[in-house]
Amino acid sequence: MKSRIQLVFLVTMLATTAFAQTKNFVPINKSMSDDELVKIAATITPTPQQLRWQRLELTGFIHFGINTFTGREWGNGKEDSKLFNPTALNAKQWVKACKDAGIKQVILTAKHHDGFCLWPTKTTEHSVKNSPWKDGKGDVVKEVADACKELGVGFGVYLSPWDMNNASYGTEAYNDFFIDQLTELLTQYGKVDEVWFDGANGEGPNGKKQVYDFERWYAHIRKLQPQAVIAVSGPDVRWVGTESGHGREEEWSVVPVGKKNKFNEGSQTKVDSPPAGDMMGSVLGSRSQLRDGDALKWYPAETDVSIRPGWFYHESEDKKVKTPEYLKEIYFHSVGRNGVLLLNIPPDKRGLISDFDVAALKTWREKLDNIFNVNLLKGVKGAGAVKKIKPLLDGNDATHLSFSMKGNNNVVEMNLKGEKTFNVLLLQENIRVGQRVEKFILEYWDNNQWKKAAEGTTIGFKRLLEFPAVTTSKVRLRILSARLQPALAEMGLYFDKEAKK
């Protein structure tokens, strides 16, 4: 999975006119003033597919395949299919472990770089049909898709463009081969919610590299599964830039795309080059960066990380599963930084999620539930200039409180019905009308004056901030800077009893 270090910050699918006509993509030119660019950025919105994806917040990654049985992270395409032989595979156990942790969608590695397919494909002999598992009659993709449907969890497929096994790799015939594989996956297993393309592009068995026909692949997906988002070598969802699980401090969903983009030198199809810009940077999409491309696009970040050091299961890593405490930090720094967390949970050789992983997931979920169980703002009333604050506390991210940013109309003040102690702030914008907040501050009343509790930059779909606990009877949120009128959808104050003092 380290292949995504090679992944370029992708330019959007400029040739796909259906998407170029929507509000999530606007071409720009040199004649536009800075004010015009800011207004354009403020009114760009997600497609229905992107909105559904963003609201998931948590997605599970299931890395499972021939590497599980060889102990490798990357295979070489020469593995014997007979090595694949899980003794107790239970896809329902995988999906249930994810669902119990609050994960709402699961993506399976149907084919990794080694070319071994987890379904009995007609396109190659390098698949489960030539393994001893279920006498060659098994289908892992079907079992996962069925489990997702039964448990009400979204289903997605990872299909590696790089294939170290197929002899046609590096020729135009491979693009036809890949279309055939996509067709099988997108027509035989019901609804597919996400198609995930890795950015790796190495040599095939003939020593050649492939020129991927992404435009054709995207059009094929749109035809067969129009509701699916395409990530991260795709036009709907971008890679955040690291595999640490930590997003940027200032993460905009509207970003510059195009040939000029300093974060991407090259075209959309050139995915074998590393990012030219600082993908580890703390800011992406700020005002100063809006001119860096030929267009502005709603292009949200997916933040991926594995629960283990590796992406596939290795017994030697059983004691290295990320702790619930660290998973909580990852949640705050991914979902809480305007991203969707893609958490990898790899099954073992038996075909089961190990007890180590299940235990970590269970305690992680309990920690989050304990923190967000009680919103201390529930039932409070607005004070000062803004008194009607119901949209902020109705649990509906489609309603919002608008701020004109004129005079004092950038402040919402609340009386807490007595003193309350809190150390976590939750904010959400109604991204259906755009992402607009650039800077905000939370203040509390103490000793007859307002004092700072926390401050931040972007909000987007969700922003979470932790800070030293404060006790007060009155708080206020001030929006210090924004692109057009902010549309604040939700606000919450919470107390994490286990937070470090």
Image (tube, grey):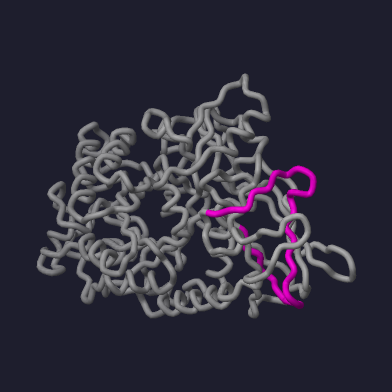
Using the rendered image of the protein, determine whether residue 248 is visible from the camera's viewpoint. no
Q: Is residue 174 left or right of residue 500?
A: left
Q: Which residues are magenta?
A: 399-427
Decide: is 217 above or below 84: above
At x 62%, y 47%, the residue is 281
Query: On the image, which quarter does residue 162 sit in?
Result: top left
At x 58%, y 33%, the residue is 40
Residue 5: horizontal and vertical position, in percent?
48, 48
At x 67%, y 35%, the residue is 288
Residue lying at the far front in this picture: please name it: 388
Type of secondary structure dominating the magenta stretch? strand
The quarter of the rendered structure image containing the N terminus is bottom left
Query: On the image, which quarter does residue 411 sit in?
Result: bottom right
Residue closest to the eye, 106 or 347: 106
Count of all numbered marks drawn on residues in the image? 0
Using the rendered image of the protein, determine whether residue 88 is visible from the camera's viewpoint. yes
At x 73%, y 65%, the residue is 414
Does the stretch in magenta take in 216?
no
Query: On the image, which quarter does residue 210 sit in?
Result: top left
Residue 203: horizontal and vertical position, in percent?
32, 41
Residue closest to the eye, 288 or 132: 288
Decide: is 113 above or below 376: above
The quarter of the rendered structure image containing the C terminus is bottom right
Residue lying at the far right in this picture: please name it: 448
Q: Is residue 428 left or right of residue 125?
A: right
Does the stretch in magenta take in 417?
yes
Residue 75: horizontal and vertical position, in percent?
31, 55
Residue closest to the eye, 44 or 59: 44
